[in-house]
Amino acid sequence: MPNLASARAQRFHAYVERLTTALGHRDRHGPLRAYVTGLCLPGDRKSIEPMAARVDPRHVRARHQSMHHFVANAAWDDAAVLRVARETVLAALERHGPVAAWVVDDTGIPKKGRHSVGVARQYCGVLGKPDNCQVAVSVSVANERASIPVAYRLYVPEAWAQDRRRRRAAGVPEALEFRTKWQMALEQITQLAADGVPAAPVVADAGYGVITAFRDALTAQGMPYIVGISTETTVWAPGRAPLPPPKYRGHGRPPTLVRHTRRHHPLRVRALAERLPASAWQTVTWRQGTRGAMRSRFAAVRVRPAHRDDWRSTPRPDEWLLIEWPRTEAAPIKYWLSTLPPTATRAELVGFAMLRWRIERDYQELKDELGLDHFEGRGWRGFHHHASLCIAAYAFLAAERLAHFPPEPLAFLRPARLPKGFTRRGAPRAS
């Protein structure tokens, strides 16, 4: 009877074989097996040459060349590989409950120089400040047990999109046009819905939530959301709405737009929060963390978003406004708008809003354990191929965690055995 490690090894190899079905040509199967194995093997660096040395130390140069060609140049479909990864995780995830949310996020990869595809001085979440980096936009499926990116695409800044020379050098597709991050996320959501991914509310931070067009597009697609907003976002207080159009006086076109006046106008969400009575605030616990229960104080009220609603003929519908204001803070620290049903409880709203912590952990593991940010090539194709294979490797880990408790690392994978007297390529020779 096989032991636990060998059983997991068999499942891993069976999974990798399923990934090869997404590639087409059989000559790509071997490099895929080597690449995904290299990502999962122990090691600090997951760029191509160190992985080749761990996978096949006796033929490092040949293995490096085949893996490099496979990732940087071969024309296989990232979406097909991600589809296999997605199906694997969804099958395991849904045994523990439905998909709870689609989480929109982006992640930064610090870079030096200016030639790597999409690199520019822009906000980098890893560093917490603007710096030279690449940024990728993703959509993850998530519930309380697990999450994984199921769409992942490099953001190409406008300066890059308009620079034909750099685009050609990096292999950016000619048909690709500049898209803002929220437009990219919306395209990914639309494609995932068309692919039949189980529907769930969309969760996003304020970088996306402050965009009224993004929220409106989700509503037009029938997708509820809970998204972060800024303190400057304006809403109508509970029970209030813009004034109806003025009465027609018989001259010109009849007025059709709703109105604000000096005395009848919306409020910034911070001003509204400060006017709420003490009874509006309650402490909510949303999960257990490493240091105990995660809890804070929240208010949840029904409001109407007011952004440019005086250009509309009807007021915007009611939504939830969720506000976090810890007792230890002098002012509220976070705000969300949500189109979850009016029957949603405060605890449910908080639970959805806080699901984003899972995605941050995913990216930390993808980078620290699987080398998502270790790719050293400069091209569009290589960037996406490497990321797709990292996510595919992570999908196996996520499925194993869902199937087996307590979760175990990929400890059953071991580097290839070295021949006697072997000297690693680049190592100093003995005198």
Image: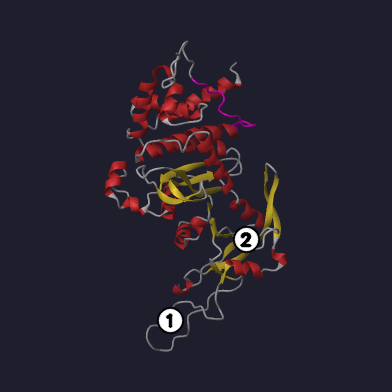
Task: Label the magenta part by its dominant secondary structure.
Answer: loop
> Which picture quadrant has residue 23?
top left
Kindly identify the amino acid type of the residue bearing the numbered disc 2: Ile
Q: Position of residue 307 (x, y in %)?
A: 49, 68
Vertical comparison of 243 with 418: above or below: below
Residue 103 on image: x %, y %: 52, 49
SS label for mark 1: loop
User: At x 39% / y 39%, what residue is drawn?
Assistant: 383
Q: To which residue does mark 2 refer?
A: 323
Going by the image, does 297 lie left or right of 413? right
What's the residue type where badge 1 is placed? Pro
Neighbor class of circle 1 (other Cα within 10 Å; few <14, some 14-19, many 20+) is few
Which percent across, then down, holds residue 224? 53, 56
Q: Which mark is residue 106?
A: none
Most foreground residue, 197 or 67: 67
2 vs 1, front mark: 2
Query: Is 336 drawn above or below residue 38 in the view shown?
Result: below
Q: Residue at x 55, y 68 (%)?
A: 304
Of callouts 2 and 1, the N-terminal one: 1
Q: Quadrant of the C terminus?
A: top left
Q: Is residue 86 magenta?
A: no
> According to the image, label 1 marks what residue?
255
Q: Is residue 377 left or right of residue 338?
A: left
Q: Which residues are magenta?
A: 403-415
